Image (cartoon, rainbow, N blue to C red):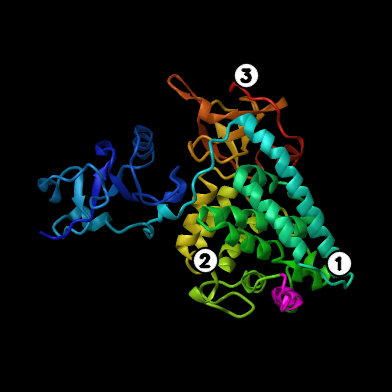
Amino acid sequence: MQDVERIKVNVADLKPGMYVAELDRPWLGTPFLFQGFPITSAEEMAQLQEYCRYVYVDAAQSVGWVPEQRQLHRMDNYLLLDNPDSDEVQADSSPRFTTQRVNLEARSVPAPKQETHAFLTVLERARESYTSTHNYIAQVMSDIRLGRAIDPAGAKEVVNTLVDSIMANESALVWLTMLKHRDEYTSQHSINVCIMSLLFGRHLGLAEYELRELGHGALLHDIGKMKVPLEILNKTTKLTPAEAEALKQHAVYGYEMLKGNPQISEASLDIIRSHHERVDGSGYPRGLMGDEIARYAMIVSVVDVYDAITSERVYHMGISPHEALNLMYGWSPSSFMRDLIESFIQCLGIYPIGSIVELDSGEVGVVMTMNLSHRLRPIITLVLDANKKPYPTRKLLNLAHYDRGDYSVNIRRILKSDAYDIDIRSLVLSGATDEAVPGH
């Protein structure tokens, strides 16, 4: 008998312990953070039954379940993927997307469960870290414009504070990356890329010293733009070929500015030069391909694009985090390694911080935290009531608290970034103080 790996299983027949290797639809449109996972709860089975008609189960990786011998041939609910005698398998056995199993062991240890009031306490400390970082990067950019030398040692101190904050509570700092304003794009983008790179690096299991090195390069990744004429940086129409080439030089400018400085490592320096390289060789400045691009630079390149397309800039409106992840998934593997993009989607979650969501109650809120122990139940700031009228006082709603029996509150859908003219920046600035009861 041939070696059996994957078996097509009707979702009604799923059992705990089965390892779901593939869905019958693109996984990005489902509530599952990763492609390839064991079923561990009734909730996961219910979610699979809601979104799919069938899945492909890897028998070798399943625990406590082995397909019966008779199920290795055609039956109503179980079909071999490579069974040449099955017309149904021949018709629909081709995967709709490339399966890339995520190495779960590489994930960092989840942070402690984030309760509402604890999150607010940590958020205040995170604001201090964010403010000091903003002040530093603004000074650096001013110094470069004025022709002054910069000392990257200051960036190390700032990054060390950010690393400590990320280690204490990831979500607080990431929530502050929603402080986006097109008139401050360059400085805020540098801060956001640093914070998100640290978050992503921690998710990938980088050691603390690696996070500091990654963050150092990420914070300074765009300093070369200060050598690019402002009329090019602030142009609201399409750049001419000459202007586009001038803009591309910022990666080289930044690298040359700090090359040979003992206060910045070669790995951090390479981020500045290589964060626009792409795996298919279409990037710049050196046209590197695949593994020629260093690990840190690849991480920062993903985060750089994500923050850029979710930010409002002088020449385009930002899109929602969910839309951005869909786009970037489509751009891989030509621009980014597919497994790296999938890991990034895992890192941010199905409901990334800053997502505008509608609850099944009709209320609308904005996701404030990633709740790793309840990944489908983040903490959100309620903004609109069921009639889409603004709440006079914004309050927090921890969806993990409303997952019991008849009283369950769920996210119905993710909305676009411009839904109901919600100003996320103002939410970050004003905050919320009390925990809410949904529907009240």
Q: Which residue does the numbered mark 2 point to in the structure image? A: 336
Q: Earlier in the sequence, mark 3 or mark 1?
A: 1
Residue 34 in view of the camera:
yes
Q: The disc labelled 2 sits on which kind of residue?
A: Phe
Q: Quadrant of residue 339?
A: bottom left
Report the span colored magenta.
248-263
Which element carries disc 1, helix, strand or loop?
Answer: helix
The quadrant the C terminus occupies is top right
Instruction: Say whether marks 2 and 1 touch (CB < 8 Å).
Output: no
Q: The disc labelled 3 sits on which kind of residue?
A: His
Q: Quadrant of residue 362?
A: top right
Which residue is drawn at the image coordinates 89% and 70% (left, top)? 146
Does the segment drawn in magenta span residue 340? no
The quadrant the N terminus occupies is bottom left
Residue 314 in view of the camera:
no
Residue 142 in the image, given as x and y percentages of width and height: 86, 64
Q: Which residue does the numbered mark 3 point to in the structure image? A: 440
Determine the main secondary structure of the stretch shown in magenta.
helix
Query: How far is the residue under mark 3 from the one under mark 1?
Result: 51 Å
In the image, 279 versus 422, the foreground residue is 279
Which element carries disc 2, helix, strand or loop?
Answer: loop
Which element carries disc 3, helix, strand or loop?
Answer: loop
Q: The disc labelled 1 sits on which kind of residue?
A: Asp
Disc marking residue 143 = 1
Asked if 112 appears above or below 185 in the picture, the reply is: above
Q: Quadrant of residue 237?
A: bottom right
Which residue is drawn at the image coordinates 50% and 56% (left, top)? 205
Residue 340 in the image, given as x and y percentages of width and height: 49, 61
Query: How far is the residue under mark 3 from the one under mark 2?
Result: 45 Å
